[in-house]
Image: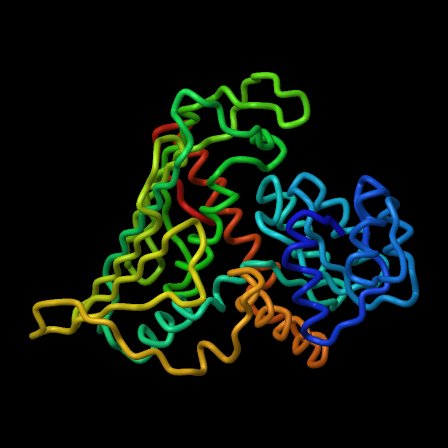
């Protein structure tokens, strides 16, 4: 359900992993029919409740904007369907917790499309951390600066904050989920969100309108284990250098870079341990790149996520990133916004 990113990544990934897709949904029926024909899918609809009620489907992939997630997820679970839901999971942590509780109550599988846990670069970092390459991790610094458009040219309009818009959910959620995957649960949050370029271009009308969706954020997270992570990100300026991640511990350091908002399948990891003066590329085991897929840079990671989704259905347990991970990530994002509004550090319950 949802045929923007859904048509680019979800549908190709599920088909490539051997799934059958009997029907697709879009708010615009013509769009649904167009994509169904493109992928040789038998049926198309603009009625998501009719789709969910079908008896010939076991699971639903939801790739809509976040404002629709709660209604669709709750309906799918009530109809007995397993759910793979796009990020950001919800508009707020209350919605996220309700969906998490519903999945637990039904015993159905609920996973979040934080596919970059499975990106080779990030899964290799997880392996190195688990093997003790840096010793006890102590700090992590992340940054993401992207632009490219003329500062005088308004960027395309995105959803408002009330509808789940903003770069914190759009890209920051992936980094928060990655940090939680590496370091565990977050205890305290301080943060800042800003909309530095409130004027945007409505893609439908070409008119210049205003939005409250942030294009810039900063946060500092203290984890239950004591590690402190900080991140700065902005999409408001001119050309940027992409993303950088630096992790330091008692015995060494790790560094990873990416050109854009997402890690590339060919991304590398640099490392250095005590007694070594310079970072050097670390040989990545082939298990982190089990296959190649040149169609879209997100497809390798997403197909690995789909494999986990299928394993979860077969075994009756929700693999990570689960609805619980989605809820906990949403808690952190809500805390960043609360801290920005109040100027106070926020504790995660």
Residue situated in front as seen by the camera: 176 or 5: 5
Indicate the position of residue 41 as horizontal and vertical percent values: 84, 62
Displayed quadrant of residue 18: bottom right
Question: In the displayed structure, does residue 37 sit left or right of residue 209?
Answer: right
Task: From this view, report whether residue 243 is shown above or below residue 39.
Answer: above
- Quarter-of-image position of residue 344: top left
Residue 138 position, x and y percent, is 23, 61
The residue depicted at 51 percent of the width and 35 percent of the height is 166
Q: Which residue: 39% across, 40% down?
A: 346
> Horizontal placement of 68 versus 337: left or right?
right
**Image height check: is 137 above or below 312?**
above
Question: How many marks are shown on the rendered structure?
Answer: 0
Report whether 270 appears left or right of 315.
left
Side of 250 relative to 239 (left or right): left
Residue 284 x %, y %: 34, 78
In the rendered image, the vertical position of residue 80 relative to residue 150, given as above or below: below
- Residue lying at 50% horizontally and 19% vertically, measured from the top left: 199
Picture residue at 63% right of the left edge, 63% below the top:
111
Instruction: Please state the horizontal and vertical placement of residue 14, each as a whole percent of the image.
Output: 70, 68
Q: Nearer the viewer, residue 296 or 262?
A: 296
């Amino acid at each position: 359900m949802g045929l923007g990113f859904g048509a680019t990544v979800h549908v190709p990934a599920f088909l490539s992993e051997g799934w059958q897709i009997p029907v697709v949904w879009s708010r615009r029926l013509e769009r649904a029919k167009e994509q169904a024909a493109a992928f040789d899918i038998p049926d198309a609809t603009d009625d998501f409740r009719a789709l969910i009620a079908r008896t010939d489907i076991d699971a639903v992939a939801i790739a809509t904007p976040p404002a629709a997630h709660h209604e669709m997820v709750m309906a799918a679970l009530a109809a007995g369907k397993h759910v793979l839901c796009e990020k950001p999971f919800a508009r707020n942590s209350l919605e996220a917790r309700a969906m998490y509780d519903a999945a637990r109550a039904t015993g159905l599988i609920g996973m979040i499309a934080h596919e970059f846990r499975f990106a080779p670069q990030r899964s290799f970092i997880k392996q190195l951390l688990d093997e003790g390459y840096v010793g006890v991790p102590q700090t992590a610094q992340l940054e993401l600066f992207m632009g490219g458009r003329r500062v005088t040219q308004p960027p395309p309009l995105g959803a408002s904050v009330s509808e789940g818009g903003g770069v914190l959910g759009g890209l920051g959620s992936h980094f928060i989920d990655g940090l939680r995957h590496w370091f565990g649960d977050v205890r305290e949050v301080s943060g800042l969100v800003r909309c530095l370029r409130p004027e945007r271009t409505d893609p439908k009308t070409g008119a210049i309108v205003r939005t409250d969706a942030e294009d810039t954020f900063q946060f500092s997270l203290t984890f239950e284990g004591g590690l402190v992570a900080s991140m700065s990100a902005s999409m408001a300026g001119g050309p940027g250098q992409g993303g950088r991640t630096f992790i330091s511990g008692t015995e060494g350091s790790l560094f990873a870079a990416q050109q854009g908002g997402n890690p590339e399948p060919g991304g590398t990891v640099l490392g250095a341990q005590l007694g070594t003066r310079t970072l050097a590329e670390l040989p990545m085991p082939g298990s982190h790149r089990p296959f190649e897929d040149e169609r879209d840079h997100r497809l390798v990671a997403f197909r690995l996520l789909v494999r986990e989704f299928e394993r979860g259905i077969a075994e009756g347990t929700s693999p990570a990133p689960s609805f619980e991970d989605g809820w906990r990530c949403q808690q952190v994002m809500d805390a960043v916004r609360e801290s920005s509004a109040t100027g106070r550090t926020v504790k995660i319950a």
